[in-house]
Image (spheres, grey):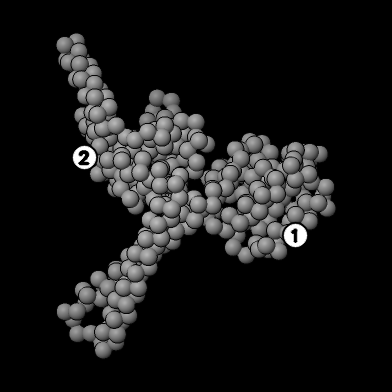
Amino acid sequence: MFFLGIDISKAKFDVALLTPATDHKNSKPRSKSLPNSPVGFEQLQQWLRLNLVPIDQLHVALEATGTYGQALARFLYERGCTVSVVNPAAIAAFAKSEMARNKTDKADAIHIARYVQAFRPAAWVPPAPEVAHLQALARRRDALLQMRQMETSRLESLESLESLESPPSQGTVRTSIEAVIHLLNEQITAIEKEMRDHIKGTPSLKESHELLDGIPGIAEITANAILAELPDIASFESAAAVAAFAGLSPSLKESGSSVRGRPHLSKIGSARLRRALYFPAVAAMRHNPAVAALAERLRARGKSKMAIIGAAMRKLLHLVYGVLKSRRPFDRGYHLTTAATAAATAAAAAASQLEAA
């Protein structure tokens, strides 16, 4: 098996190749730097041929660094390579374990190649074209919202100075800011309409969207974000695996008898998915019987507000996994019965403890 590590940036990418004859610790990998463009992709393919690398025996890994690596990952996938998109935190931890002293693009590519050789991470599968289009629209909407928030903050700062004597240019600046906000509002409305039309025109997305929209706490925008950012549900073995993908798994810090850190969310996962679930989870704590029952139990145990919200986000994602995996709508009656049973069990346990005391 051959292993290729890729460190990618906006303008170029560095590769490091480990062959079956390459000793993990002592041999020097073959390295090359290429432009991050279709021309560079073709040059990489030619370089692999010159090094007698069978494409079907090549395992490639690159870090999940936003949009810079998407085109190259898809290019290699379409040519028959096994491609893995790895969390940068895993590569950084692996480099530390090797006592890395240098931080260069070439060195990073070597660490990625050694990581994939040692751990054989799971293969990446690109999203279906209809999902990729929805993802692009959703991320563009997020970017527009961020720009609008920046301009709104500038306008608010300007308004706070209105009571003071201001230069003549202030009126011009205010007009400019308001014009930009108006344009951004129009663009956001247009993007949201295109997302809505795209989902309605794609049967698989429409069905999944209707299933998600039936979960109390999840509305149209959240359902859009989940469909855009969550990979094919069939690729997950369990609801816990989905929670781990979103970085919503609890992380513990315990050592010996003296170290007892407070549990917190791992946050090693999709930040976009976590952001999309925060406010829906808060709403679900009031309107979703399954999430509300969980929140009540945690409050009774003295958990903090943020710990309860984190658990609610995880529970909501478990429900998402359930309806998408089973292709059955959310059953409020079932969850009301389950919540009542859980509450009765908790009350009985509390009563037993009082009697024992």
Q: Kindly report the distance in space between the C-alpha atoms of the residues bearing marks 2 and 1.
A: 56 Å
Residue lying at 79% horizontally and 46% vertically, measured from the top left: 53
Relative to 100, residue 236 above or below? above
Q: In this view, does 199 lie above or below 317?
A: below
| Residue shown at 34% from the left, 38% from the top | 316
**Residue 204 can be seen in this image:** yes
Q: Can you identify the residue that label 2 sits on?
A: 286
Quick check: 150 left or right of 20?
left
- On screen, residue 54 versus residue 81, left or right, reads right
Judging depth in this view, the residue of 329 and 34 nearest the camera is 329
Q: What element carries label 2?
A: helix
Q: Residues within 10 Å of mark 2 (few under 14, many from 20)?
A: some
In primary-sequence order, the first of circles 2 and 1 is 1
Q: Which residue is drawn at 21% across and 24% down?
A: 340
What's the mark number on residue 84?
none
User: At x 49% / y 50%, what residue is drawn?
Assistant: 131
- Name the residue type under label 1: Gln
Q: Where is residue 249 in the image (x, y as percent from the top left)?
A: 41, 36
Estimate the x, y position of residue 184 in percent, counting from the top left.
35, 69
How far from the left and from the top, in percent, is residue 341? 24, 21
Callout 2 amino acid: Arg
Q: Is mark 1 on a helix, strand or loop?
A: helix
- Percent coordinates x, y for residue 101 in the rendering: 64, 49
Residue 13 falls in which quadrant of the image? Answer: bottom right
Check contact, mark 2 vs mark 1: CB within 8 A: no
Depth order, front residue of 207/88: 207
Against 52, residue 260 (above or below) is above
Image quadrant holding the N terminus, namely top right
The residue that label 1 is drawn on is 43
